[in-house]
């Protein structure tokens, strides 16, 4: 299929068409951005309504990671001066989760550095999730690397419903940013998580030196995996990492990427993540042009946006973080 008309394409996607690997998507790269964004807005309105999903994270274990991902401030091979610490005390994590729940966040995730959380630290995480499930109502997400099937079973039993594990980029470009594990390792982990009943949150980073074709390939790969929540990070180059000298992406490139991901993954939550500050009005325009979700509060090693600021922004835009039960045309990441 060759795309030549955005309005017609939007109509067809609403009617049930899905873009596939092998389709000629070049027009998505050359169409006027305003035209592309209007189509993305229509798709977002149709599949997601006026709901914006807000999730929060806590850096549960920081630094000293043995992997060599070039973008990461927590890799031991980089010298970034970030704070390093072992798995946080249960009380501190629960206090943070409770505050985020009361502020209006929909979901809370513990994120830990390292190839995989294991041993005593994994046991601590399980006990912490169990305690949160017993005392809080916020949905629980986890991001602990390349886990085994048995570990996923324990997470599910502890009350975790979502698992975050990015594919980061295209299969072609992945070896340019990481060689300590493979793209297929990540795919295999995602499939195990899905088989064990998790909603998987998976996306990646743009601005690492990849091509537009790599970005489209990542979008299609996520569609093929059936991903319901897709975080899009714009690289914030951190001194001391392997990508320290990469220039920041222009806002127009980020906005076009968001819109393209909406066309390829119309029913998913396209989630703003790191790099929001590179966008006009801290991402406000993106929320009306394809982005139906955001990580809020602080990121792992870069400053984010507070929940209060986001709640004010959503109200001004006529959006809400409460799920609109009238919208049933697609999942839009609802879980």
Image: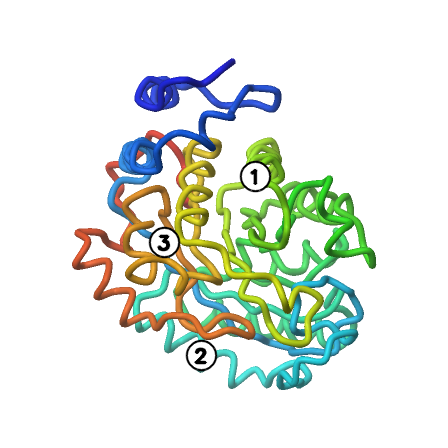
Residue 259 sits in which quadrant? Answer: top left
Residue farthest top in this picture: 1
Viewer-proximal residue among 287 and 225: 287
Q: Earlier in the sequence, mark 1 or mark 2?
A: 2
Q: Earlier in the sequence, mark 3 or mark 1?
A: 3
Q: Which residue is mark 2?
A: 96
Q: Residues within 10 Å of mark 2 (few under 14, many from 20)?
A: some
The CA span between labels 1 and 2 is: 38 Å
Label 1 sits on a secondary structure element that is helix
Please identify, in this view, whether the residue under mark 1 or under mark 2 is nearer the observer.
Answer: 1
Q: Residues within 10 Å of mark 1 (few under 14, many from 20)?
A: some
The reply to whether discs 1 and 2 touch (Cβ–Cβ < 8 Å) is no
Residue appearing at x 63%, y 75% in the figure? 239
Q: Is residue 138 above or below residue 81?
A: above
Left or right: where 179 falls relative to 269: right
The reply to whether discs 2 and 3 touch (Cβ–Cβ < 8 Å) is no
Residue 129 in the image, given as x and y percentages of width and height: 56, 69
Residue 312 in the image, given as x and y percentages of width and height: 21, 66
Residue appearing at x 45%, y 18% in the figure? 3
Total residue callouts: 3
Q: Earlier in the sequence, mark 2 or mark 3?
A: 3
Viewer-proximal residue among 312 and 189: 312
Q: Which residue is mark 1?
A: 212
Please identify, in this view, whether the residue under mark 3 or under mark 1 is nearer the observer.
Answer: 1
Residue appearing at x 55%, y 72% in the figure? 300
Label of residue 53 in the image: 3
């Amino acid at each position: 299929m060759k795309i030549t008309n955005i309005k017609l394409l939007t109509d067809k996607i609403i009617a049930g068409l899905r873009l596939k690997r092998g389709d000629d998507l070049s027009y998505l790269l050359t169409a006027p951005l305003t035209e592309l964004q209007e189509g993305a807005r229509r798709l977002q309105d149709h599949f997601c309504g006026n709901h914006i999903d807000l999730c929060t994270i806590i850096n549960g274990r920081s630094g000293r990671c043995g992997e060599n991902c070039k973008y990461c401030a927590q890799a031991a091979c980089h010298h970034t001066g970030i704070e390093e610490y072992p798995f946080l005390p249960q009380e501190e994590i629960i206090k943070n989760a409770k505050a985020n729940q009361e502020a209006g966040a929909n979901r809370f995730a513990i994120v830990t550095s390292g190839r995989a959380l294991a041993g005593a630290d994994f046991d601590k995480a399980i006990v912490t999730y169990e305690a949160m499930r017993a005392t809080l109502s916020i949905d629980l997400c986890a991001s602990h690397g390349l886990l085994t099937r048995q570990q996923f079973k324990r997470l599910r039993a502890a009350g975790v419903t979502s698992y975050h594990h990015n594919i980061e980029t295209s299969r072609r470009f992945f070896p340019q940013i990481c060689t300590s594990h493979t793209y297929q390792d990540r795919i295999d982990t995602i499939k195990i998580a899905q088989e064990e009943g998790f909603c998987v949150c998976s996306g990646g980073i743009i601005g690492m030196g990849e091509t537009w074709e790599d970005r489209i390939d990542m979008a299609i790969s996520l569609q093929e995996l059936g991903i319901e929540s897709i975080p899009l990070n714009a690289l914030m180059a951190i001194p001391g990492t392997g990508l320290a000298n990469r220039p920041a992406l222009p806002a127009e490139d980020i906005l076009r990427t968001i819109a393209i991901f909406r066309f390829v993954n119309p029913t998913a939550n396209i989630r703003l993540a790191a790099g929001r500050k590179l966008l006009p009005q801290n991402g406000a325009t993106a929320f009306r042009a394809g982005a139906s979700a955001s990580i809020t509060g602080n990121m792992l090693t870069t400053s984010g946006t507070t929940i209060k600021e986001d709640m004010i922004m959503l109200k001004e835009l006529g959006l809400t973080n409460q799920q609109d039960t009238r919208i049933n045309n697609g999942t839009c990441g609802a879980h």
